[in-house]
Image: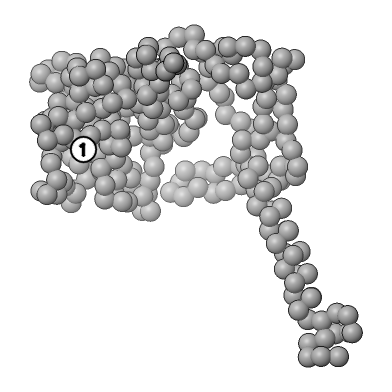
Amino acid sequence: MGTGALTSYFDVAQVVLYAFWIFFFGLVYYLHRETKREGYPIEVDTPNGEVKTMGWPDAPTAKTFNLPHGQGSRTVPGPRPDEYEVAATPMWRSSGAPLQPTGDPMVDGVGPAAWAIRPETPDLTEDGAPKIVPLRAAPGFGLTKRDPDPRGMSVVGCDGVVGGKVTEAWVDRAEPIIRYLEVAVGEVADGEEGTSVLLPMTMARVKRNNTVVVNSIRGDQFAGVPKLANADQVTLQEEDKITAYYGGGTLYATPTRSEPLL
């Protein structure tokens, strides 16, 4: 028998190979099962009604995670949160049929404007402070002089209509970048009482003519952006609704966007 051979037909290399196969199969099984902690069972709408399916393997046993900074705990799989009613109907009786909005899809959360149910608490830094805050509430943060300062610039929608004026920038204190621009809409843009909304920086383009262009919604639709409960912080749920509103505008802002090209 050669070096490493256990018998004439079995050696150490084979043992290591088989052990790796068993370990790899177990790892894939474990990871695939762990992915089913949320989102399962899958709900499928069929002509005969709603069908729930889990697939193989089954969901893992419940596990409780302790959240940091006194935010309690979360058990998954666990009771599903109450879902909001979708104001839309299938265009035909078939599984996976597209939805036809029955109201204002950008407000009702339909299609690209859909949002997930998330906690009504802000995202926190490692030391437990709100992560995304306006510059007025973030001592030590500011805008570099090498970049244009968007504060005071007019915000223009996809139709060329001015929807408001930038009054503040919101910074991510964990990653020093601008996350949102605070936009004054309505009469507040003229120095009187009005409303302020957030504009995701990724949906805005700062132009050389001192304007901020947003191609996803019209100028008059800035007034419909979901509002904040606290003027100096944004919750995870509010972030989801705000980004969904602008994302939904890419399809629903104008009638022509939801029509076929041909």
Residue type at mark 1 is Ala
The residue that appears at 20% across and 41% down in the rendered structure is 135
The residue that appears at 68% across and 58% down in the rendered structure is 27
The residue that appears at 31% across and 51% down in the rendered structure is 175
Quadrant assignment for the C terminus: top left
Q: Position of residue 46 (x, y in %)?
A: 70, 19
Which residue is the site of mark 1?
169
In terms of depth relative to the viewer, which is nearer, 150 or 174?
A: 150
Element carrying mark 1: strand
Depicted 165 relative to depicted 233: above or below: above
Quadrant of the rendered image containing residue 49? top right
Q: Position of residue 226 (x, y in %)?
A: 34, 22
Q: Residue furthest top?
A: 102
Q: Position of residue 104 (x, y in %)?
A: 42, 12
Quadrant assignment for the N terminus: bottom right
Question: Is residue 241 in view?
Answer: no
Quadrant of the rendered image containing residue 159? top left
Instruction: Name the side, left or right, on which 2 lies relative to 27.
Output: right
Depicted 101 relative to depicted 140: above or below: above
The residue that appears at 14% across and 21% down in the rendered structure is 189
Question: Is residue 95 in view?
Answer: yes
In terms of depth relative to the viewer, which is nearer, 62 or 204?
A: 204
Residues packed near mark 1 inside 10 Å, few (<14), some (14 to 19) or many (20 plus) = many
Q: Residue furthest right?
A: 8
